[in-house]
Image (spheres, rainbow, N blue to C red):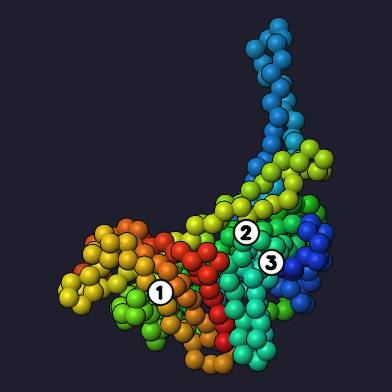
Amino acid sequence: MPKLIKRELILAKIETQYGTDANPSGAQNAILVEEIGWSFAGARMAERKPVTSTLGALQGVFAGTLMEVTFSAEIKGSGSAGTPPEIGPLLRACGMAETITANTSVEYNLASQDHESLTLYFYEDGSLYKLTGVRGTWTPTLTTGEAGKIAFTFTGHVDGPIDQNLPVATYNDTVPPPVINMPFSIGGFSAVISALSFDMGYTISTPPDISAENGYGEILITDRDVTGSFDPEATKVSVKNWIGEWKGGTKQALESGTVGSASGNRYSFSAPEVWHKEISPGDRDSIRTYEIGFGAAGGDNALSLIFT
């Protein structure tokens, strides 16, 4: 029987000890995702180049691999203020520290140490890959009239595939709020935009370890350079001097504004110190716009995501 792309699952659970299988279950740890992709990362095939009487090559030797899994997920709350969203474990394994205020909010902030890891089970319609010691990066995108999405890329130590039937998966049934009625502002100015995105710019390091079964040690987040983009309508200089701010390196606070209106299913992004890194003209329905790429300063406060 052929494998169907529609019949694939992602389960994810935070590990209590790095690299030890946390045994995620379909009932407790299923994540609703889209567009699953995978590849073997850092696969080693040792070449053999002896001198012989012929010009032929010898068979290479497999010498270990990691696995990279990619997918996107909707940005939505849990339905209850102060309860982490379904994607919470994914954010925590992407170098984000989780802070819970009971019955009020769940906030995710950048962290420079003590990064958590997760176990990720990837079911491919009858096959199972088990990834442990998983860490990754995330790229959120908000586009007018759509659900907010986050693209995730995870790297882990892989065991499998093995034959395994898909478990029954239970998902959080909260419906994501559409990206509308979002009062975006930059430097206190209410700009008209159609899209906003962030990129964490992580460096994911996979150091060799001669004692490890696959020849790889702990997967680490070792660097970060948060950037992003938005596309405001152009204005007169007297209203907002976009190009002057770019030339002057002006730092400004960026606030996405709240997406959603129902308690337990609202979220917003905040970046207190952004500056324009690049600017170019755009055209949106015959209206002049700017395509602005920005950088974000502020250390671990460079970006936060809060659910309320």
Could you tell me how far apart the alpha carbons at marks 2 and 1 are, in whole angstroms?
25 Å
Could you tell me how far apart the alpha carbons at marks 2 and 3 are, in whole angstroms?
15 Å
Residue 77 lies, with reference to residue 49, above or below; the image says: below
Residue 234 rendering spot, x and y as whole percentages: 22, 71
Q: Secondary structure at mark 2?
A: strand
Residue 256 rendering spot, x and y as whole percentages: 43, 78
Label 1 or label 3, whichever lies nearer to me, is 1
Looking at the image, which residue is at 46% across and 64% down? 297
Q: Amino acid at mark 1?
A: Leu
Return the residue at label 3.
Answer: 10
Of the numbered discs 1 and 3, the one sitting upstream in the chain is 3
Return the residue at label 2.
Answer: 136
Dot 3, how many residues are within 10 Å of its Cα: few (below 14), some (14-19), or many (20+)? many
Of the numbered discs 2 and 3, the one sitting upstream in the chain is 3
Dot 2, how many residues are within 10 Å of its Cα: few (below 14), some (14-19), or many (20+)? many
Image quadrant where one finds the C terminus: bottom right
